[in-house]
Amino acid sequence: MIRLLFKSREMILGAAILVLVAAIASRFPAFVAPSNLANVFNDTAPLIILALGQMVVILTRCIDLSVAANLALTGMAVAMLNTVMPGLPVPLILLVALCLGAFMGLINGLLVWKLDIPPIVVTLGTMTIFRGIIFVISGGEWINAHEMSDTFKAFPRAVMFGLPVLSWIAIAVAAGFVVLVGRTPLGRAFFAVGGNPHAAVYTGIDVGRTQCAAYVLSGALAGLTGYLWVARYAVAYVDIAAGFELEVVAACVIGGISIAGGIGSVGGALLGALFLGIVKNALPVIHISPFWQLAISGSAIIIAVAFNATSSRAKGRVILKKAEHAL
Amino acid sequence: MVMLAKGIEDASPQSGEGSAPVLSLTGISKSFPGVKALSGVALDLYPGQVTALVGENGAGKSTIVKILTGIYQPDDGQIRINGEPMSFPTAQDAGSAGVTAIHQETVLFDDLSVAENIFIGHAPKTRFGLIDRKEMTRKAKALLERIGAQIDPGVPLRDLGIANKHLVAIARALSIDARIVIMDEPTASLSHKEIEETYELVERLKADGKAILFISHKFDEIFRIADRYTVFRDGEMVGAGKIAEVGERELVKLMVGRSVDQVFPKRTPQLGEEVLKVVGYAHPTEFEDIGFTLRAGEILGFYGLVGAGRSEFMQALFGITKPSKGAIRIDGKVAVTRTPNEAIGHGIVYVPEDRGKQGVIKGLPIFQNVSLPSLKQTSRNGFLRLAEEFTLARDYTQRLDLRAAALDQDIGELSGGNQQKVVIAKWLATKPRVIILDEPTKGIDIGSKAAVHEFMAELAAGGLAVIMVSSEIPEILGMSDRVIVMREGRIAAEYEGADLTPEHLVRAAAGITEVRT
C-alpha cells in the first residue's frame, strides 16, 4: 500500500510540499491561513503558466530559454499599445498578447524544425534578440502605472469567486493542459517525439512539426503571461522577469519532467512550480535570507534529478517488476 | 588495366611461397548470447601476400576482424604471431603486436591534420617532452610519399575524400610498423579511379612484405589482387587455399554451401490481385529505376549486399526520404507517399531494421504504443478515447500472443521479443495492404526466427502483400515467392521458381557476369 502510494513522482513531490508547508505552519501558523495560501498561489501563477508551456517543449526533447524575454517583450508591446490606445478592450489585448507570444514561439519552432539548429542555441539567440527589441521599441524607457489605463491594470487583479483572475487563468491553463496532453493526438505526439524520435517518424508523426507546435504553445503562454505580469505590477521595462526562464525550467525539472524528453505530467509541472513558489514566499516569513532561496531551489533540482535517474534505472530490472506484478 | 595486372603478377614476390605464416589463428571460437559467431576457425596470413576473406553476411568475418584487433576476446583458440602465442586483451595490444585494420568507415579524427592523425599517440617529441611538429610533418611526408599518396600532411583530414582518408590510415599503419594489415571492404564506397589507386597501394604494401587480410564481396577484385583465399560460412572455416587454384564458381559454392538447416514454414501462396506497382523510382544518390509489382498474399524478397540501396528504397517508398522520380500505384490508383503519414494512409507500413531504435517508444504504455499510428480511428472530434485505444491494443496484441502483465505497463518492461510483437501489432492495427519488413530476423535467436517466419507466412496467407528485405540467403530462399536482387542502387535481377538458387542470388548481388573456371 505504501509502495503504491509512493509509486508516482508526483505523489512524492506532493508529500514533500505538504511536509514543507506543515513545517512552516508549525512555527508560523499564519502562513497556512487560506488568504495567505491564495496569495502564494497567485504569486506562483505566472510560474505555473510558463512551466506548463515549458513542459511540452521539454517533452519533445527541446528547451525554451526565450520565455522570459518573450514575456517581457509582449508585456512591453501591450503596455505601449495601451498608452497609444487606452480604450482597447481587455479581450483584444489578451488576443494581441497571445498572438504576439505565439509568433515568437513560432520563430523558435521554425528555426528548430526547418533549420535543424539545436534548441538551446536557437532560444538562447532569440532570448537575446527579444530583449534587444524591447530596448529598441521602448528606447530604454519605463512605462509606469500612471501611463496605463485602469481597465488594463485591473484585469489580473479582479477577484472572482474569491480568487484573482490571474489565479483563475493559471487554473484554466492547467485544466486545458490536462486535456491537451492526455486526450489529444498532439499531446500524445509530444510524448512519442520525446520518447523516441526515430520511432515517431516511422509511426507517421512529423517530429519537427510537433516540436514547433510545442514552441508555439510555450510562446503563446509566455505572451499571455507578459500582459498579466505587466498589468499586475503596473510597470513595464526592459529587464522584467530577467532570469525567470531558469526558474521555469527548474520548476519542470523538480516536477519530474525528464530533460531527456518523453516523460512528464501536468501535475508534475504544477507541483514543481508550487514547490518553488512556496519556498520563495515562505523564506521571508520565517526570516531566512532570500539568498538561501537560490540554494534551496538548486538543491531541489539536484535531488529531483538524482531521484528521477534512480527511479528510471530501476525500470530496467524486468525480473523484479514481474515479481512485483505476481505479488 | 590488363597491362598492370600482368605486371603485378610478374612483380608479386614468390618468396612468400612456402614461408611460415606471420599470423596464424587456430580453433578460434566466439559465442554471443544465443548465437555462435565462430566455431573453431583457422586463418593464416603470409608476409607479402594478400589473403581474401570471403563469406556471406553473418558468416563471422567482422567477428574475426574484431578478435584480431583486440575488440573481442575469443572464447577458445590460439593466436600466433611468427609462431609465438599472443593474446590481445585491448586494441592497443593488437596495435603493438603489429596488427592494424583499415575499416570501411575509417576511424580517424576529422578536425586534426593529416600528420597529427598519422602520429596520434606516438608523435615524435622534442627534448622538453612537447610534440615536435617539424619532425612529425617531415616523417608524415616521407610516409605518404612511400605509399605514393599526394597529400599535404598539414591539411585537416576533413578536407580529404574517402580514398585519401584510407591512405592516411595506411600511412598510420606504416608509422607504427604494422606487419599485418586488415582491409575491410576498402573499395566499397570508392569511385572507379580510387579503386584502381587502392589496388596499387595493396601492391606496394605487398612489396613491403606486409601480410594483408582483404575482405571483399566483389569477386573481380578478389581474383585480381588476392594470392590466397579463406571462406567462412555460418561461423565456420569451410575452405582455404591459393586463388590460382580455385574458380569463381567453386568459391561461390563454398560461400553459400548446400545445407540449409533452418526449417521454413511450408506455404502454398494464394496470389490475389496486384496491390502495389512501383514504376521508375529514383533517388539522386541512393538508387535508380526501381520498378516492380506486388500481389496480395505474396512475399517478395529483396536481396543484396549491405549498401545495395534496399533500405534506402524502402524508406523512400514509405515517405521518409523523397524520391526524385517515379510513381506508385495502390490497387491500380496513383498514390503519393511524401510522408510516412501518407504512406500509412495508403496502407503501406514499414517495420524498420533497428526495432529498438526505430520501433518502440519507451515511456508510453503498451496500449499507447499500439494505438499511436491509429489515433485517427480511435479519437472523436479531435479527442482521444482511451477505452477505444485499449480495445484496439487488446485485439491486436492477443492475435500476436503477447505476454504482458497489463497493457498499461510501460513497454520498456517487456522482453525484446515481446517488444517486437508490440511493434508488429501497432502496424497490423492500421489494417495495412503492404507490409515492409526490413531484416525481420536480424539479431534474434533461432527459435524466435522461426516464430517470425511462421507469422510472416500467416500474414501473407491472410492476404497481406509482404516485402521482406533480408541479407540472409536461407531466409530469402525459404520465405520468398519471388526475389529481387539489388546491386549498387539498381535492380540487378529478379528470380522465381526454379531460378531461385543461392548461386544466382550471389552472382547477381556481386555483379558477376562472365563465368570463370
Image (spheres, coloured by chain):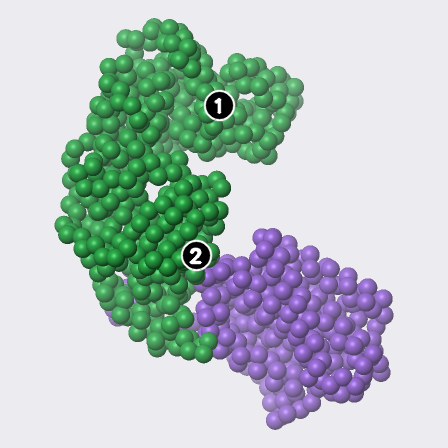
Chain colours: A purple, B green
Q: Is residue A93 left or right of residue B237?
A: right
Residue type (three-letter) at the residue carrying disc 1:
Lys
Tag 2: Cα neighbours inside 10 Å, few (<14), some, or many (≥20)? many
Residue B351 image point, x, y percent = 34, 54
Residue B417 image point, x, y percent = 28, 55
Which of the numbered marks, if any, corresponds to residue B334? Answer: none
Residue A100 image point, x, y percent = 69, 71
- Report the residue marked by disc 1: B193
Label 1, secondary structure: give it: helix
Residue B499, compared with residue A107, is above or below; it is above
Residue that appears at 49% across and 69% down = A186
Let me know if residue A286 appears in the view: no
Residues at badges 1 and 2 in contact (C-beta under 8 Å)?
no
Q: Disc 1 or disc 2, which is closer to the eye? A: 2
Tag 1: Cα neighbours inside 10 Å, few (<14), some, or many (≥20)? few
- Report the residue marked by disc 2: B337
